[in-house]
Image: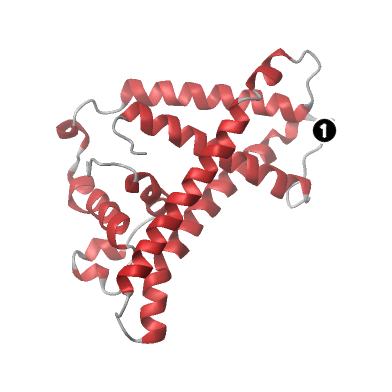
Amino acid sequence: MTFDNIFTFLFFFNLSILGIKNISIPFLLKFRILALNNEHKSNIQNYSISVLIGIFLFCTLCNFILLIPAFIFFISNSSLNIDHYVKFSINLLKIILIILSFIGIRDLFNINKIFKNPIQTTSSEYDKNFLISLFISTLIYLIFSPKAINHGIHYDTGLYHLPFINHLSKYAIEPGLANLHFRYGFYGLSFFGQVPFQIFSNNSN
């Protein structure tokens, strides 16, 4: 499975977001880490926050998985079999993204229930709004996104953003990575969340 075009990428990206939502909502709301009051729709903020926290935790998990080879290198003080650990990290990210996508597909099968159910709970109303907003934001992205690579690669993107993500998708996080470019030592957590998607892409751009 590869993301050969923007439509395939966006489809699986949205599926993974739905998967993250289906994991984070039960965990954060049902276990009362965040409160969801079924009687008041004002708590949609908690619903949204739980999704954002889920995305944050996904990016954090990707960071830790990409650090596995570096941890083993520091513990063993040897680069022996480091390639196997890199492959393990990359394949683990692939598996996680596939699992999230399958969870998202399961959520798609509930669309008819969400939109056709005349008696909706607060939670299903939030799900409906979330699906609508996800669809609208995807359309907006398709309209305003660059239609050619020479229009989309800005100075920072071509200099270190995209090369850094491409490097992580092939070699994980390496000690001394900032020696390749000093900006490789300064990055946002979202970079790690982009790596699993870049792994599935044949196009480095």
Q: Position of residue 166 (x, y in %)?
A: 26, 52
In the image, residue 6 sits, relative to residue 193, either above or below, namely above
Task: Examine the image and state in which quarter residue 115 appears.
Answer: top right
Q: Is residue 17 visible?
A: yes
Task: Examine the image and state in which quarter residue 154 appears.
Answer: top left
Q: Amino acid at mark 1?
A: Asn
Q: Which residue matches tag 1?
A: 38
What is the number of callouts on the image? 1
SS assignment at label 1: loop
Q: Quadrant of the N terminus?
A: top left
Q: Relative to residue 113, is residue 165 drawn left or right?
A: left
Q: Relative to residue 80, is residue 113 drawn left or right?
A: right
The residue drawn where x is 42% and y is 84% is 75
Instruction: Give whichever of 59, 98 is nearer the camera.
Output: 98
Q: Relative to residue 29, is residue 189 drawn left or right?
A: left
Instruction: Give whichever of 197, 45 is nearer the camera.
Output: 197
In the image, residue 200 sits, relative to residue 72, either above or below, namely above
Q: Quadrant of the C terminus?
A: top left
Instruction: Give whichever of 175, 40 is nearer the camera.
Output: 175
> Circle 1: is it few (<14), some (14-19), or many (20+) Cα within 10 Å?
few
Q: Position of residue 107 (x, y in %)?
A: 62, 31
In the image, residue 163 sits, relative to residue 130, either above or below, namely below
